[in-house]
Amino acid sequence: MIPRKKLDIGWADLACGLCACFGVAKCDDAQDRLERFWSPAGNALACLSVRSGFDLLLQHLALPRGSEILMSAITIRDMAGIVEQHGLTAVPVDLARDSCAVQPQTLERAITENTKAIVIAHLFGSRAAMDSIVNIAQRYGLFLCEDCAQAFAADGYRGHPGSDAVMFSFGTIKTATAGGGALFSFRETALCRAIAGMQCRYPLQRRGEFIYKLLKIATLKALLYRLPYTLFVLLCRAVGKNHDRVISNAVRGFPGDKLMRKLRHQPPAAMLVLLERRLRNFSPALLAWRKAAATRLLALLPPQFHVGARAELHSHWVFPILSQNPDLLVRHLWQRGFDATRGASSLIVVTGDRSIAAEASNLINHIVYLPFETCDTDAELQRLAHAIVQFARAG
């Protein structure tokens, strides 16, 4: 079985992270070095996760209860949940299938007198054009938050300079993962300092939790070689478990309940040390194979399967396609040795009382994620594409 994805971290990085857990690095020093690396101007904040930083941001903004936040219609489940936890209303703004981006005219139509903020998510490794969205936010006096959790490409992008807050994630399955952690950039230094002051009052995440996370990542990394992964899938079938669900649960950032309590911690020093190491040693060249494989696969698939192919920039963090029978296609690809999935991430469609995101719903209801970056040769990519086209022709 060809595994669904590679974990973007080396064995030496994992060893460094574990050593840091038993080192004497001070959290304040590690945080300052990392934030200065990310933003020499002093406008960065390292957080436990994007969810943690987003929760801090909403606490600081203290918007009136019932205020509306316009959000990209497809986002992480917990992001919409955090908005609701603050007594606010998430309003979905539909996406265009060819770019997976919010269209400026759709966004502007959704604005009401109760709208206070906008959250734009860059999806699947794509990066949407922000100029028009920034202009709209400034014209209406709305706080603009740019969610780049899936869009890190090691190309120096820190968000649009007109965005009020920009969020990058380095969780388990993200590019340049450090086993967790997030970096925020803020347009105003005063806002950055205010939120940093709030975070300082949080307890540190316990060292044992980060050690457990690194050991879990090491186990998953070892499992994601072809032979052990094939044996794992066969074992799951033998005991009546769905391997897809087992893997999806294993990579969740905050499993279980009590989400808000788990979020409200400072990142441990070892996580910050590891994240600084990952970012200093990462370059766009490390993504070259992934981008090249995605380009070749796109050329092999008819346009009706494409999702986000016309995005302004794409690092292809994942490779989604559309199918009229997605569950059957996943099983069809399993039978041919490709571990496709429908649950590669915890993305949902935001629901709202006054807005229906038809295109986003169609995407989520028909999406399949392909194991493109774990195909070692062009022949395997061709075999993957042939299996998909064969399935579609068979109806």
Image (tube, rainbow, N blue to C red):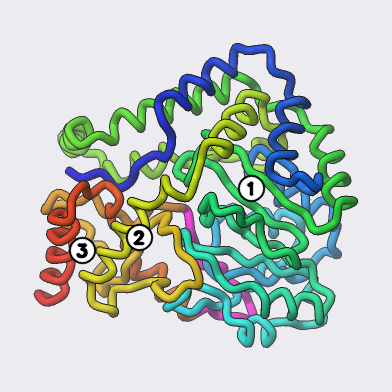
Compared across the picture, whether 366 is left or right of 12 comes to left
The amino acid marked with disc number 2 is Phe
Residue annotated with mark 2: 319
Residue depth check, mark 3 versus mark 1: number of the one nearer the observer:
1
Q: Is residue 281 positioned above or below 384 on the image?
A: above
Coordinates of residue 298 in the picture (x, y in percent): 28, 68
Q: Give the mark nearer the N terminus: 3 vs 1.
A: 1
Q: Could you tell whether 294 is left or right of 124 in the image?
A: left
* Amino acid bearing label 1: Val
Front: mark 2 or 3 = 2
List x then y, in percent, for residue 161. Answer: 73, 64
* Residue 84 pos. (x, y %): 69, 59
Rounded to the nearest angstrom, the CA distance separating label 2 from label 1 is 22 Å
Name the kind of residue labelled 3 in the image.
Leu
Seen at 68% across and 44% down, the residue is 38
Quadrant (top left/top right/bottom left/bottom right) for the N terminus: top left
Is residue 115 or residue 9 the one in the foreground?
9
* Residue that mark 3 sits on: 329
